[in-house]
Amino acid sequence: MVIPGVGAFGDGVANLRPFFPKIREFYASGLPLLGICLGLQVLFEGSEESPGVEGLGVLRGKVVRIGTDLRLPHIGWNSIEVRKGNCPLFRGVDDGFAYFVHSYHALPEEAVVAATASYGCSVTASVWRGNLFGTQFHPEKSGAVGLQILENFLEL
Amino acid sequence: MKMLCRRIIPCLDCDLAFPEGRVVKGIEFRRIQYAGVPWRLAARYYEEGADEIVFLDITASHEKRETMAHVIEKTSENVFVPLTVGGGIRTIEDARKVFEAGADKISVNTAAIGDPALVNRLAGHLGSQACVVAIDAKRRYVRNPEQAKGKNVVETPEGPCWFECSIYGGRTFTGVDAIKWALEVEERGAGEILLTSMDRDGTREGYDIPLTNAICERVSIPVIASGGCGTMAHILEVFQKTQVSAALAASIFHHEIHHVGEVKRFLAERGVRVRPR
């Protein structure tokens, strides 16, 4: 299952809420689940972007505005630094470039960060726990590197 | 310090009078020259390392929206970088149509000047990251400061000037101060500004550096420089002298003066951070 982006947290959750039970059920089944961009963010408990709106909460932590002095949104190609070398998503991808567009990123309260990017601060680029995967960047828009990541996901 | 890569964006000016569209390469002796079918060129630029591709409907025609959607749909089968569509987008519905076909961003100019709240609506519905405001700016030299009351006057090597926004592809002038407008659209939720110099567009004399700096220094959203690129050195110059996030170019790619990979190697060798292919 893939939960795509992009959009605002509040709108995204409003559209997705009817599917929350199905997503939870799918996640519990152990089959691979990938959230992309906003799809990663909704895995968390909530977001500063839309206070009071509850996410899926399958990962502990919150989504916050990127704490940087640089231009926001963070738009463009940035290098991803893989933090969990054993994450199957990044097989054959060593610290390549990926396309980001976002102003908020996840701050997990558990050790699930699989990759980061630097943008005046450390940005959460990917999360992973068991069958749950998320990328803040857009693999579908990240050229050959992105296609490799999607292929890795499909092979799970 | 590690930073975002500077982006190289080929722009395809599309004439949608043809069933699959045609990319307009140049207009010489009043004869339009065509560079090819948009999706084929887009695929070639993608293979060469383009970071993003912009499609502009030069006819800006409402009835050709379906053709543009088809062009984008066809392109997104083979091209895995962001696609931006501009020209004639007036409503959320217009934007939706090209989004459903696979576009990632839309760019608006004329419709936004006429109805600034359109920027808020587009940003609200599609997200700021998908809402690019195109500003086509023309220098207006100031001989008498009285004439430029209330305008942001910028010093240039050619003398002080303010920048006026034009619409309808540069055919109509609005009296709107481009610097003021840039700040307003940022406030209204635009995610990026596509800044074209009408003085340099088509000249191949290089980007308008004072204009680009004037806008970049005032807004905090990313700015794409456009208009005037004729050589790789022009791209280097705009990256070295301004804070722009990206450089857009058309003719140097369509005329095969340089290919995208070559431009990126040239920039990388001179210390500009770009995405290797």
Image: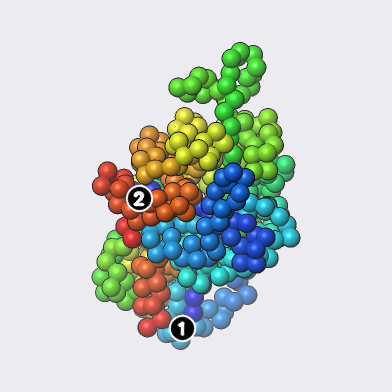
Classify residue A98 by image quadrant: bottom left
User: Is the residue B269 above or below the residue B214 in the image?
Assistant: below
Q: Is residue A29 visible?
A: yes
Percent of width and height locating residue A7? 56, 60
Q: Nearer the viewer, residue B203 or B173?
A: B203
- Residue position for label 2: B263
Residue occupying image coordinates x 72% and y 42%: B114
Question: Looking at the image, which residue sits at the far bottom?
Answer: A29
Secondary element under disc 2, as helix, strand or loop, is helix
Three-letter amino acid code of the residue under disc 2? Val
Residue occupying image coordinates x 38% and y 34%: B241
| Distance from Cα at disc 1 to Cα at disc 2 | 49 Å
Secondary element under disc 1, as helix, strand or loop, is helix
Chain to which mark 2 belongs: B
Q: Nearer the viewer, residue B192 or B201?
A: B201
Tag 1–tag 2 contact (CB < 8 Å): no
Classify residue A99 by image quadrant: bottom left
| Mark closer to the observer (1, 2) | 2
User: Is the residue B139 above or below the residue B14 in the image?
Assistant: above
- Residue position for label 1: A28
Percent of width and height locating residue A47? 51, 58
**Can you say which quadrant of the picture contains the C terminus of chain B?**
bottom left
**Can you say which quadrant of the picture contains the N terminus of chain B?**
top left
Residue occupying image coordinates x 41% and y 36%: B242
Percent of width and height locating residue A153? 39, 78
Percent of width and height locating residue A143? 40, 65
Residue occupying image coordinates x 65% and y 67%: B19
Tag count in the figure? 2
Three-letter amino acid code of the residue under disc 1? Ala
Q: In this rendering, would A77 be left or right of A13?
A: left
User: Is the residue A125 above or below the residue A72 in the image?
Assistant: below
Chain to which mark 1 belongs: A
